[in-house]
Image (cartoon, grey):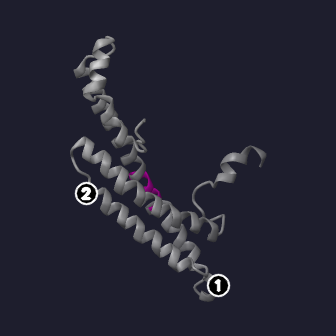
Amino acid sequence: GLPNLRTTPQTIPTFNSEKNKALFTKLKILAPEAADARVEIMYEKYNNEVSIEAKTMIHMMNTGIIPACAKDLAKYESCKELAGKRTEVYGNIIKETEKLKDVMAKLPSDLAAEANYLCDSVIPQMNALREFVDTAEGLMEASLYPYPNYETLIYSHHF
């Protein structure tokens, strides 16, 4: 049967397998060296895109979300019981942002290893952070939230 390759880093090395190189050569589609070069380009593209997304997420947390959380939490200073789970959620955003920074600082230099690391370590950390940010969006006063929500993005032409 067909292999069940679920992630980009799993699929990339199959492109220049010996079987595929032989087929590409036989059909005069690509020389073996060209297939190897394409694999390198695929890794570079994947690694750059995920790295940019992670760095952008860290920037958005530090310049938008975390300051908004601080402003929102300050509104409950005189009546902490009304804050609900804000302190916990906002604190977790800070912790998970720091974890993402730490994970990003440990990127391997080999293209294939970096792609696998991004897939197996960085993206799951980004998803963990996003869960808390999505929760915060529901807790925070809408005027404080620094980025448009899905409703605004989809239906803004109706407002």
Image quarter for residue 82? Answer: bottom right
Q: Residue type at mark 1?
A: Leu
Left or right placement of residue 152 versus residue 20 in this view: right
Residue at 61% across / 82% down in the picture? 84
Q: Residue type at mark 2?
A: Lys
Does label 2 or label 1 sit earlier along the sequence? 1
Residue 82's tag is 1
Q: Secondary structure at mark 2?
A: loop
Residue at 50% across / 68% down in the picture? 67
**Is 59 in the magenta?**
yes
Residue at 66% across / 48% down in the picture? 153
- Of badges 2 and 1, nearer the viewer stands 2
Marks 2/1: CA distance?
40 Å
Residue identifier under label 2: 106
Image quarter for residue 144? Answer: bottom right
Residue 100 visible in the snapshot: yes
- x and y, in percent, of residue 27 in the image: 33, 12
Q: Quadrant of the N terminus?
A: top left
In the image, the segment drawn in magenta is 55-61
